Image: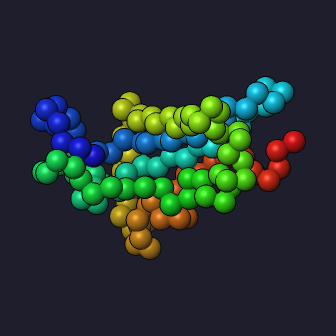
Amino acid sequence: IMRNDYDAILHWPFSYEVSFCLIDQSTLNNNQHNTTASFWPDIRLDCFQRPVYNMNHSYGIKEFCSLVEFEQNKSFYIRDNIMFIEANINFLTERPVLPSILYTGGSPNDDDCIDRTGENFMDRS
């Protein structure tokens, strides 16, 4: 998250759902399969607090699309040396407040908690 002129009117910490979508540009039988992942920010982390410096520490999704999967299927995602990644922030809902006891094992964005949907890249019929 980067600091900007509108930080004073935003709600902090940043607590909105974030989604990323790797767009399938193939036109095979109109059977496109985008790869999508989403997460709710862990508001306890510094990276989701109001920025004090120009930019907060980064945050990422560990397994959005593995490099091996991407390399095996890059012809679906790259056309004319162009790749599209859609990013969405759902400002209409905030992270549900859950009892902290649910997160005693780690961050809600640990491997077991990240929302990850997509296709089986090896099964493209």
Whether residue 12 is visible: no
Q: Quadrant of residue 6?
A: top left
User: How many numbered marks are there?
Assistant: 0
Q: Nearer the viewer, residue 104 or 76?
A: 76
Q: Residue at x 87, y 42 (%)?
A: 125
Q: Residue at x 52, y 56 (%)?
A: 114
Q: Quadrant of residue 92?
A: top left
Q: Residue at x 13, y 32 (%)?
A: 5
Q: Quadrant of residue 74?
A: top right
Q: Residue furthest bottom?
A: 105
Q: Nearer the viewer, residue 123 or 98?
A: 123
Whether residue 1 is visible: yes
Left or right, 111 with reference to 91: right
Residue 75: x percent and y percent? 71, 41
Q: Residue furthest front?
A: 80
Left or right, 97 with reference to 82: left
Residue 27: x percent and y percent? 76, 27
Q: Nearer the viewer, residue 64 or 107?
A: 64
Colour treatment of the image: rainbow
Residue 33: x percent and y percent? 71, 38
Q: Residue at x 12, y 35 (%)?
A: 8
Q: Is residue 40 above or below residue 4?
A: below
Residue 1: x percent and y percent? 27, 46
